[in-house]
Structures are given as structure tokens and as C-alpha cells.
Image (cartoon, rainbow, N blue to C red):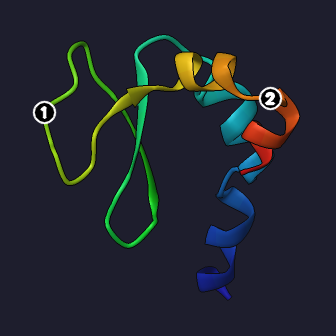
């Protein structure tokens, strides 16, 4: 039964998007497999295989903030 305690303790995806991705210095990149990676950096590393972009900048460029957040 203790194994089933982990699932409710995990934050929902909506909570992560609305609370974590709106913080400063949050970066995202899309790797070669199409996975979106999210991390926090003062200065993002240079990685040609997964170029890090500031989430707030990418969100501002999106046609729809709701759609961006849903992706």
C-alpha cells in the first residue's frame, strides 16, 4: 500500500506550468527526440543539440498563452 502514496504526492501538470514556469530564469529546450526539457539557470549552457530558450520570452512570442501553457 505504501507504493501507492507517491502518486498523490506528485504535483499536477497544471500546477507545475502555472507555478514553476512563470518564475524567473526558467529555460526550456526541445531535444532531438522532441521532448521539452525545463530547467533553471542564471546563464543557460550552450548546447546545439538542445538550445535553451527563456520560457517567458517564448511564451510572449506565442499566439496564445493558453495554448503555449497547454503544450
Count of numbered tags: 2
What residue is drawn where x is 20% and y is 54%?
Answer: 49
Asked which quadrant contains residue 1, the reply is bottom right
**Image check: 20 left or right of 8?**
left
Q: For mark 2, what is the residue? A: 63
What residue is drawn where x is 62% and y is 69%?
Answer: 6
Q: List x then y, in percent, for residue 50.
A: 27, 49
65 over 68 or under it: above or below: above
Q: Secondary structure at mark 1?
A: loop
Residue 25, labelled with which disc? none
Q: CA distance from mark 2 to mark 1?
A: 27 Å
What residue is drawn where x is 12% and y is 33%?
Answer: 46
Q: Alpha-carbon neighbours of circle 1 within 10 Å: few (<14), some, or many (≥20)?
A: few
Q: Mark 2 against mark 1, which lies toward the viewer?
A: 2
Asked which quadrant contains residue 54, the reply is top left
5 over 9 or under it: above or below: below
In this view, which residue lies farthest toward the bottom?
1
**Image check: 67 left or right of 13?**
right
What residue is drawn where x is 28% and y is 22%?
Answer: 41
Whichever of callouts 2 and 1 sits on the residue coming sooner in the sequence is 1
Q: For mark 1, what is the residue? A: 46
**Image check: 55 left or right of 69?**
left
Q: List x then y, in percent, for residue 52.
A: 32, 34
Amino acid at each position: 500500500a505504501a507504493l501507492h502514496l507517491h502518486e498523490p504526492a506528485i504535483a499536477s501538470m497544471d500546477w507545475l506550468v502555472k507555478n514553476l514556469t512563470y518564475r524567473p530564469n526558467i529555460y526550456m529546450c526541445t531535444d532531438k527526440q522532441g521532448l521539452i526539457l525545463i530547467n533553471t539557470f542564471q546563464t543557460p549552457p550552450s548546447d546545439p543539440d538542445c538550445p535553451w530558450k527563456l520560457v517567458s520570452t517564448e511564451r510572449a512570442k506565442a499566439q496564445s498563452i493558453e495554448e503555449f501553457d497547454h503544450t
